[in-house]
Image (spheres, grey):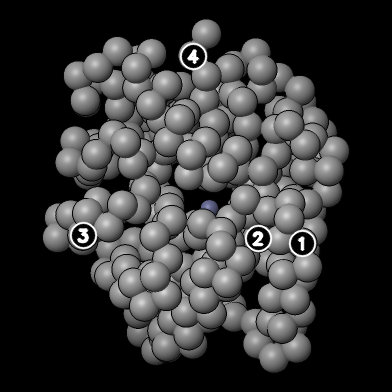
């Protein structure tokens, strides 16, 4: 059986009974582990608890998702203090980044949107990754990726994972040359833009993910997102790169283990 790791999932967002059934059947599907990213402090705490109960399968990342209203002051300090205190169990800082979709939505509705506070927060999180010597999981797509690249360079952070990335060719080249990783979701099966990225990006810097419970379209329409779906992602990558599924699965698994040190 091929072996995989789901490199980006919001495990804490599933109902407890679904979490349990999912974790208990991972082995059946060759899934060796899940990188469980966090949305905010409550989400960090829940992922830490899931890791405590399923230590061989759950690898948590702690951060603050950018597609939501910002927190500040004491609430933000509390989050940073908590992450520093629980650094031992964490595999990365994440999910952090910039609010591309929230911003586009606001702009489409004619509302103004201030990006600067989000950029300042991302700067702090990347500095935290440097301080803790941990990789960083980024939500930074299209033009936002350039800002993220600049901040990574500023703090000399090389271990960056741009999850579910989409962007222009120039940025893609810059990211590949900088040694950054990108991950692919089940939408590689039906999105031409994502397939083109997979063609361009080096296999040695690729991972696979579901971003579950985010729902997918095409053949996945109406199905609850489950880590087993990443076998389809690996299959597509193998086809695009012209290699066997076994070779693709093994390389991607080793990339993920090396990147997250798991
Ligand atoms: Zn995510």
In the image shown, does 161 or 218 lie closer to the viewer? 161
The secondary structure type at the circle numbered 4 is loop
Q: Are marks 4 and 3 in contact (CB under 8 Å)?
A: no
Say above or below: 132 vs 13: below
Q: CA distance from mark 1 to mark 3?
A: 33 Å
Q: CA distance from mark 2 to mark 1?
A: 9 Å
- Snapshot quadrant of residue 260: top right
Which image quarter is the C terminus in? Answer: top right
Q: Is residue 204 visible in the rendered structure shown here? A: yes
Q: Are marks 2 and 1 in contact (CB under 8 Å)?
A: yes
Q: Residue at x 45, y 60 (%)?
A: 138
Reading the chain from its start, which is encountered first: label 3 or label 2? 2
Q: Which residue is mark 4?
A: 2
Q: Residue at x 19, y 35 (%)?
A: 199
Where residue 174 is drawn, which disc sits there?
A: 3
Q: Position of residue 82 (x, y in %)?
A: 77, 70
Q: Which residue is mark 2?
A: 62
Reading the chain from its start, which is encountered first: label 2 or label 4? 4
Q: CA distance from mark 3 to mark 2?
A: 26 Å
Q: Residue at x 69, y 91 (%)?
A: 73
Q: How many marks?
A: 4
**Circle nearer the viewer, 2 or 1:** 1
Q: Crowding at label 1, few (<14), some or many (≥20) Cα neighbours within 10 Å? A: few
The secondary structure type at the circle numbered 2 is strand
Q: Crowding at label 3, few (<14), some or many (≥20) Cα neighbours within 10 Å? A: few
Residue furthest left as drawn: 170
């Amino acid at each position: 059986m091929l072996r995989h790791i789901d490199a980006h999932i919001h495990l804490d967002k599933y109902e407890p009974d679904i979490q349990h059934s999912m974790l208990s059947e991972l082995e059946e599907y060759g899934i060796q582990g899940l990188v469980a990213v966090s949305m905010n402090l409550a989400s960090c705490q829940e992922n830490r608890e899931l890791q405590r109960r399923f230590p061989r399968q759950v690898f948590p990342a702690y951060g603050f998702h950018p597609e939501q209203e910002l927190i500040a002051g004491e609430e933000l300090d509390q989050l940073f203090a908590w992450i520093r205190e629980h650094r031992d169990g964490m595999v990365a800082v994440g999910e952090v980044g910039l609010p591309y979709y929230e911003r586009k939505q606001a702009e489409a509705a004619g509302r103004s949107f201030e990006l600067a506070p989000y950029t300042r927060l991302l700067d702090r999180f990347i500095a935290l990754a440097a301080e803790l010597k941990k990789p960083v999981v980024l939500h930074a797509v299209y033009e936002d990726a350039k800002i993220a690249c600049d901040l990574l360079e500023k703090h000399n952070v090389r271990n960056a994972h741009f999850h579910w990335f989409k962007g222009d060719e120039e940025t893609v080249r810059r990211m590949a040359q900088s040694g950054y990783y990108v991950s692919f979701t089940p939408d590689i099966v039906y999105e031409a833009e994502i397939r083109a990225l997979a063609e361009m990006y080096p296999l040695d810097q690729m991972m696979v993910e579901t971003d579950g419970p985010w729902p997918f379209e095409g053949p996945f329409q109406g199905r609850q997102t489950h880590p087993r779906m990443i076998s389809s992602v690996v299959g597509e990558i193998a086809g695009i790169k012209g290699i066997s599924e076994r070779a693709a699965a093994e390389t991607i698994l080793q990339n993920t283990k090396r990147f997250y040190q798991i």
